[in-house]
Amino acid sequence: MSRVALDAEARSIVLRRYSQHVIELVLLVAVSLLSLVPGFFLAAGLVRLGVPSEHFALLAVLPMAVVPLLAVAWAEIWYPYRHGGSTPAMRWLGIRITTLRGGEPSLRDYFVRWLLMVVDGLLFGLVGAVLIAVTPRNQRFGDIVTGTVVVRRVT
C-alpha cells in the first residue's frame, strides 16, 4: 500500500472519530433533556407525598445528572465490550476499538478509556482532537494509556 493510501485511510479514521464524538454528544444532550420529563413528574410526586417544595428543583434535575452518566457508561463501556469494540455511533460509522495487537480490549480497558475522557475532553475536546490528529496511530490519551487504537470495522 502506498504512503498516500495510508494517509487517506488515516484521515478517514480521524474524520470518523470526530464525527462519532459529535453524534454521541448530540445523543447525550437529547437523553439529558428527555430525562427532565420523568424527573419533573418524580419531583412533583415526591412534593405531593410531603417532601418540602424547596427541594423540587433539585429533585427534578437529579435524573438529568444520573441518566446521562449511566447512558454514557453504557455506550462507552458496556456496549463496545459486548459488541465487538464499537459504540453505537462507531457501528454506524464503520469503526471499532481494538488493542494494538489486534485483540479485543478488556472491560478494564474500556473503563479506563472512559475515565480518561476527562483529559481528552479538556478545552472543549481540543486535547483529544489534537492527540488524534498528531499521534502516529491517531490515538487519544485514553487509547495511549490502555494500548488501544480505533480502526475500520471489517464486516
Image (spheres, rainbow, N blue to C red):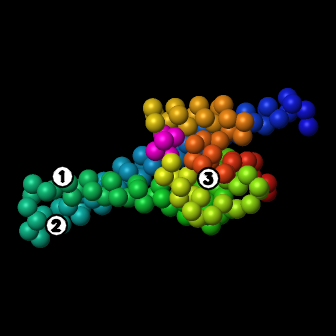
> Crowding near pointer 3: few (<14 within 10 Å), some, many (20+)?
some
> Crowding near pointer 2: few (<14 within 10 Å), some, many (20+)?
some
In the image: residue 51, left or right of residue 68 = left
Q: State the extent of the magenta-drawn residues as a range.
A: 117-121
Three-letter amino acid code of the residue under disc 1: Ala
Q: Residue drawn 9% across and 58% down?
A: 53
Which labelled disc corresponds to residue 150? none
Residue 22, horizontal then vertical, whole percent: 54, 40
Residue 33, horizontal then vertical, whole percent: 36, 49
Residue 20: quarter of image: top right
The vertical placement of 26 against 37, above or below, is: above
Q: Which residue is mark 1?
A: 57
Three-letter amino acid code of the residue under disc 3: Thr
Residue 152, horizontal then vertical, whole percent: 75, 48
The vertical placement of 141 against 69, above or below, is: above
Mark 1 or mark 2: name the one nearer the start of the chain.
2
Which labelled disc corresponds to residue 46? 2
- Location of the C terminus (image quadrant): bottom right
Magenta span main SS: helix
Mark 2 or mark 3: name the one nearer the start of the chain.
2
Residues at circles 1 and 2 in contact by the CB criterion of under 8 Å: no
- For label 3, the SS is helix
Q: Which residue is mark 3?
A: 146
Q: Residue drawn 60% across and 35% down?
A: 131
Residue 72, horizontal then vertical, whole percent: 47, 55
Mark 1 or mark 3: name the one nearer the start of the chain.
1
